[in-house]
Image: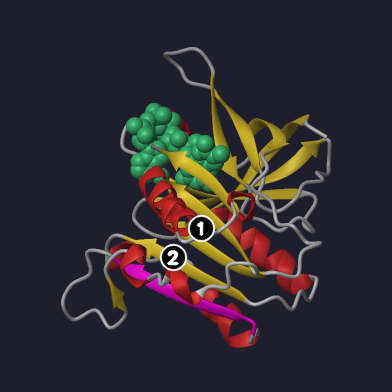
C-alpha cells in the first residue's frame, strides 16, 4: 500500500566521485512493505523553488523493513542532487511509496537476465539480496555498464555474490576504459548475444539510461522475446 513516510537520514557512503549510498531510517511509520525493484518518491525541498518530487529505486532488500537504502548519482546543479549534497546526518526527509511494477516475479522459474547502466544497478542490488535470502535457484546473469574505470562501484558486492552463488554470473563493461583495462571494454550491447538466451525461458530486466533500455528492449523484441517478459525502468531519457 502506498503511504507517506517520515524518515531520518542516518548514513552516506561515497562509492565514486559522484555516486553515493544514502540510508534513511523510518520514523513514521516505522516499517515499510515493498517488493524489491520498486521506487519511492522523495519530497525535495529547496530554498529557492517550490517543493519537487523525484523518484529513487530502493536499493535495499525487502526483508529490511525499518530502513531504506538508495544509490544515487549526484548531477551537477540538479535540484534533488543539490538537496542530497546539503543533507546532514539527522535531517528528516519525506518519501511516498512504494511505487512501480519493475518487480521480480518470484512465482516464475524462468532464467533471469539483469541489465543495468550507472545507478540503474540500484534495484538489482535489493533484488539479488532478496533472491539469495530466499535461496531462489534460478539462473541469473547480469550485465552492468559504466562509462569510465573511475565510475566503477558495487564491484566487490557483485563479485562476492558471483563467488558465493553458482547460479549468478556477472559481467562488468566499461565503454570508455583505457587500453590497459583488463575487463570488458565497450558497451553492454557489444557483448550481449541475444541468441544465447532461451526465448521461452528467460525474463529480462533493464534499468538505467533510456538509450540502453530502449535499445536492448528492441533487440530482444526483434529476436522474438515476448514483451511481457521484458521489464524496464528508465531513470532518464
Ligand atoms: C522510477 C525512477 C527511479 C529512479 N531511481 C534512481 C536511482 O535509484 N538513482 C539515481 O541516481 N537516479 C534515479 N532516478 C533519477 C532521479 O529521479 C533524478 O532524475 C536524478 O536524481 C536527477 O535529479 P535532479 O533533481 O538532481 O536533477 P534535475 O534537476 O531533474 O536535472 C537533471 C538532468 O540530468 C539528467 N539525469 C537524470 N538522472 C541522470 C543520471 N543518472 N545520469 C545522467 N543524467 C541524468 C536528467 O535527464 C536531467 O536532464 C530514477 C528515476 C526514475 C523515473
- Disc 1: CA contacts within 10 A as few (<14), some (14-19) or many (>=20): many
Residue 170 magenta-drawn? Answer: yes
Residue 19, compared with residue 156, is above or below; it is above
In the rendered structure, the answer to whether residue 81 lies left or right of residue 68 reads: left
Q: Is disc 2 placed on a helix, strand or loop?
A: strand
- The label on residue 144 is 2
* Residue 34 visible here: yes
| Magenta stretch: dominant secondary structure | strand
In the rendered structure, the answer to whether residue 61 lies left or right of residue 196 reads: right
Quarter of the N terminus within the rendering: top right
- Whichever of labels 2 and 1 marks the residue nearer the N terminus, that label is 1
In the rendered structure, which segment of residues is drawn in magenta?
167-174
- Disc 2: CA contacts within 10 A as few (<14), some (14-19) or many (>=20): many
Beta carbon of the mark 2 residue lies under 8 A of ligand 1: no
Residue 101, compared with residue 17, is above or below; it is above
Whether pointer 2 and pointer 1 mark residues with C-beta atoms closer than 8 Å, the reply is yes
Beta carbon of the mark 1 residue lies under 8 A of ligand 1: no
**Residue at image coords 16%, 77%:** 179
**Residue at image coords 44%, 60%:** 15
Residue 50 magenta-drawn? Answer: no
Query: In the image shown, does 32 or 46 lie closer to the viewer?
Result: 32
In the rendered structure, the answer to whether residue 100 lies left or right of residue 216 reads: right
What residue sits right under mark 1 in the picture?
Answer: 121
* Residue 82 visible here: no
Q: Is disc 1 placed on a helix, strand or loop?
A: helix
In the rendered structure, the answer to whether residue 108 lies left or right of residue 80 reads: right
Of the four image quadrants, the one with ligand 1 is top left
Amino acid at each position: 500500500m502506498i503511504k507517506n513516510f517520515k524518515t531520518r537520514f542516518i548514513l552516506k557512503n561515497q562509492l565514486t566521485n559522484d555516486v553515493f549510498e544514502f540510508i534513511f531510517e523510518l520514523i513514521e511509520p516505522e516499517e515499510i512493505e515493498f517488493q524489491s525493484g520498486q521506487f519511492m518518491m522523495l519530497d525535495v525541498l529547496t530554498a529557492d523553488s517550490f517543493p519537487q518530487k523525484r523518484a529513487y529505486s530502493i536499493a535495499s532488500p525487502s526483508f529490511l523493513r525499518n530502513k531504506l537504502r538508495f544509490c544515487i548519482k549526484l548531477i551537477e546543479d540538479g535540484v534533488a542532487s543539490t538537496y542530497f549534497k546539503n543533507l546532514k546526518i539527522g535531517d528528516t526527509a519525506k518519501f511516498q511509496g512504494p511505487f512501480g511494477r519493475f518487480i521480480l516475479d518470484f512465482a516464475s522459474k524462468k532464467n533471469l537476465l539483469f541489465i543495468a547502466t550507472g545507478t540503474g544497478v540500484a534495484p538489482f542490488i535489493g533484488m539479488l539480496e532478496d533472491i539469495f535470502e530466499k535461496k531462489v535457484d534460478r539462473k541469473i546473469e547480469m550485465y552492468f555498464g559504466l562509462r569510465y574505470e573511475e565510475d566503477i562501484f558495487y564491484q566487490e558486492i557483485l563479485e562476492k555474490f558471483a563467488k558465493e552463488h553458482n547460479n549468478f554470473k556477472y559481467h562488468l563493461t566499461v565503454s570508455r576504459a583505457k587500453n590497459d583495462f583488463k575487463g570488458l571494454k565497450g558497451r553492454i550491447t557489444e557483448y550481449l548475444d541475444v541468441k544465447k538466451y532461451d526465448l521461452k525461458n528467460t525474463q529480462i530486466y533493464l534499468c538505467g539510461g533510456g538509450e540502453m533500455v530502449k535499445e536492448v528492449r528492441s533487440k530482444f523484441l526483434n529476436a522474438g522475446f515476448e514483451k511481457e517478459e521484458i521489464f524496464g525502468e528508465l531513470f532518464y531519457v
